[in-house]
Amino acid sequence: MLWRGRRQSDNIEDERSDSGGGLGGGSPGQFRVPIGGRAGGGSSIVLVILVVLAGWYFGFDPSQILGDGSGGLVPGGGGQITDDSGSQDSTGAPASDEMKQFVATVLAETEDTWTGIFKANGLTYEDPKLVLFSGQIRSACGFASSAAGPFYCPGDHKVYLDMTFFQQLDQQFGASGEFARAYVVAHEVGHHVQNLTGIMSKFDQMRQGMGETEANQMSVRVELQADCFAGVWAHYTAQKGILEQGDMESALNAAKQIGDDTLQKKMQGYVVPESFNHGTSAQRQTWLARGYKSGKLSDCDTFNNPV
């Protein structure tokens, strides 16, 4: 990914020096990769939903849906992220902080893409904040540990990321490459788009009458749509000439490695399909590729199409 020298977002909040302190595990109030989270209120920009979902499914509360049912799919985060030279400090921040620059650049690219898409529909995109932390962090959705993985909190419109997850993605999940890391950020920003467009709030109402299995099935559709949105972003990023050979393949491999079936088989030796709440490896790859191929939000309707 040809990211160096490009604009970096100002919407980075670096809390790594303030993180830590012996908090418990992740709260059920976040939207994580590859786990899950809580929605805030709806949004006034309903027109985008009409474009994306043909006027169907206007809401979702990820904390209520994903909560406790998916918390054991990812091994705890650990270790420290290093720069190319291997140097690091006690907070996990590289000495050169090149990874922070990378994340800020990816975030800026998502800002540019979604601002353009919203503008094309007569709407205004609200940039999310991205919070870097180390170990654990307090968000509007509660306390969270880095073991939970990156997450989006609809309550404060922020993406939370402990960058040691990138090391885990590479060494434990076998998903290496810069664009695999970019996909993680783009997926969480996809949840932000869902929050802005109101997809999260309506589903909170719908799920009240759902059992756990049905709610899991619906949360899979929400997650796959975030994957598709990440693909839409990748489509426009490729048009800018930023992607290099093999970049999209690394993102698709990351989607494969964090599929529910792959993770469950790796962690416990067998799969429980009714507990899936993010989608299988094949599903995640399919919807990421679909968004990338077309670049159209209308092709990300995971609610009215088979997944």
Image (spheres, rainbow, N blue to C red):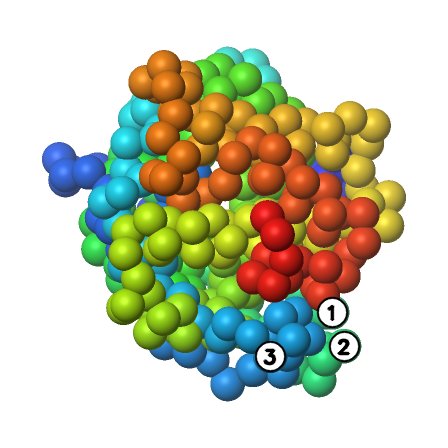
Q: Are marks 1 and 3 in contact (CB under 8 Å)?
A: no
Give the residue at x 54% y 17%: 174
Any mark on residue 165, and which?
none
The mark lying in front, picked from 1 and 3, is 3
- The residue tagged with tag 2: helix, strand or loop? helix
Give the residue at x 43% y 50%: 217
Can you tell which quarter of the image residue 78 is in? top left
Any mark on residue 116, and which?
1
Mark found first going from the N terminus, 1 or 3: 3
The amino acid sitting under disc 1 is Gly
- The residue tagged with tag 3: helix, strand or loop? loop
Q: Give the CA separation, mark 1 to mark 3.
A: 21 Å
Q: Give the CA separation, mark 2 to mark 1.
A: 6 Å
The amino acid sitting under disc 2 is Ala
The amino acid sitting under disc 3 is Gly
**Location of mark 3 (residue):** 55
Could you tell whether 222 is left or right of 14 in the image?
right
Could you tell whether 283 is left or right of 74 in the image?
right
Q: Give the CA separation, mark 2 to mark 3.
A: 18 Å
Mark found first going from the N terminus, 2 or 3: 3
Residue 88 visible somewhere in the drawing: no
User: Few, some or many C-alpha atoms within 10 Å of disc 2 (few <14, some 14-19, many ≥20)?
Assistant: few
Give the residue at x 80% y 47%: 293
